[in-house]
Image: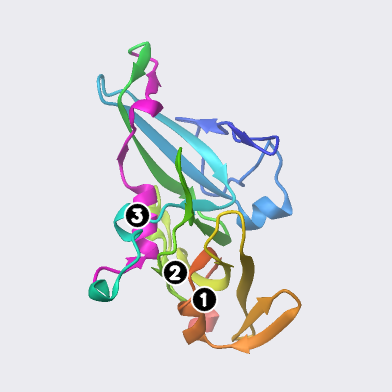
């Protein structure tokens, strides 16, 4: 329900008339942070017993994506030609229809009790800067480990249109994002390690490692085992620019 004292309560319920022009607000306030990083999710929950559908809109500043379980095992030499995990796999896992397990039963208002249900996320409004967090730290009742799987990600042209609630209302280039920065966690432990970052400036890529900044190249960046990815919305060209 909250994080660091900030409520993530429902901002608008079904049939509220929410439009894509609405700003993302956290705790009722719009700030420079929400104006840049803020988006809106639609959360749909359906009761599997009576079919009742519940919808709500939630603000977000980042999307936390699971690395699908089929990609989590480290590939051995004999598996080098196996399937490669991509950022699209992670986004698809986040937005695909999911049946909630027994520990997450939905309180159906029509049935008047907790029932089995399905859940699905749609993106109602995309932010100017899209922050994608890959869940590299896996916690269970007995184990804490890091998911060291390499996830392939694009430097340019990440298309988010297929994850939108109303893609038909978006322009041809309004859902395209280009990579601006990558945060990497080095180390195998959950409670230890070191963080560095790659970021682009004036068409060149740099590696930031504590007080050291070095020039690098795109080939090095795409090989990084990303922990957090920052994508910037591509600005659609004006009519005069196209001529």
Give the foreground label among 1 and 3: 3
For marks 1 and 3, the one nearer the N-term is 3
- Residue 188 is covered by the magenta coloring: no
Label number found at residue 68: 3
Measured in 3D between alpha carbons, the distance from the residue under mark 1 to the one under mark 2, in whole angstroms, is 9 Å
User: CA separation, marks 1 and 3?
Assistant: 36 Å
Which labelled disc corresponds to residue 237? Answer: 1
Which badge, 2 or 3, is on the more N-terminal residue? 3
Q: Secondary structure at mark 1?
A: loop
* Mark 3 nearby-residue class (10 Å; few <14, some 14–19, many ≥20): some
Q: Earlier in the sequence, mark 1 or mark 2?
A: 2
Residue at 64% across, 58% down: 36
What sort of colour scheme is used for the picture? rainbow
Residue at mark 2 to residue at mark 3: CA–CA distance = 28 Å
Q: Is residue 44 visible?
A: yes
- In this view, which residue lies farthest toward the top? 112
Specify start and end residues of the magenta stretch as a single range: 81-110
Which residue is nearer to you in this view: 19 or 30?
A: 30
Residue 167 visible here: no
Q: Quadrant of residue 83?
A: bottom left
For the N terminus, give its image quadrant.
Answer: top right
**Toward the viewer: 217 or 108?**
217
Q: Which mark is residue 173?
A: 2
Q: Residue at x 39, y 47 (%)?
A: 165
């Amino acid at each position: 329900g909250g994080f660091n004292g900030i409520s993530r309560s429902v901002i608008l319920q079904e049939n509220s008339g929410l439009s894509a022009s609405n700003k993302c607000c956290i705790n009722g306030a719009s700030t420079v942070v929400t104006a840049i990083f803020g988006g809106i999710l639609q959360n749909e929950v359906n009761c599997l017993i009576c079919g009742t559908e519940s919808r709500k809109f939630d603000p977000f500043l980042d999307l936390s994506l699971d690395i699908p379980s089929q990609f989590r095992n480290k590939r051995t030499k004999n598996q080098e030609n196996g399937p490669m995990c991509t950022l699209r796999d992670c986004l698809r896992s986040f937005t695909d229809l999911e049946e909630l397990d027994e520990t997450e039963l939905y309180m159906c208002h029509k049935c008047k009790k907790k029932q089995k249900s399905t859940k699905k996320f749609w993106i109602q409004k995309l932010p100017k800067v899209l922050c994608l967090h890959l869940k590299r730290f896996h916690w269970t009742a007995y184990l804490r480990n890091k998911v060291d799987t390499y996830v392939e990600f694009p430097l340019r042209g990440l298309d988010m249109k297929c994850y939108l609630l109303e893609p038909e209302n978006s322009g041809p280039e309004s859902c395209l994002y280009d990579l601006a920065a990558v945060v990497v966690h080095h180390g195998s432990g959950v409670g230890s390690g070191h963080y560095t970052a790659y970021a682009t400036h004036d068409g060149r890529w740099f590696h930031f490692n504590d007080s050291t900044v070095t020039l690098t190249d795109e080939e090095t960046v795409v090989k990084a085992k990303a922990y957090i990815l920052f994508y910037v919305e591509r600005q659609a060209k004006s009519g005069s620019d196209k001529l």
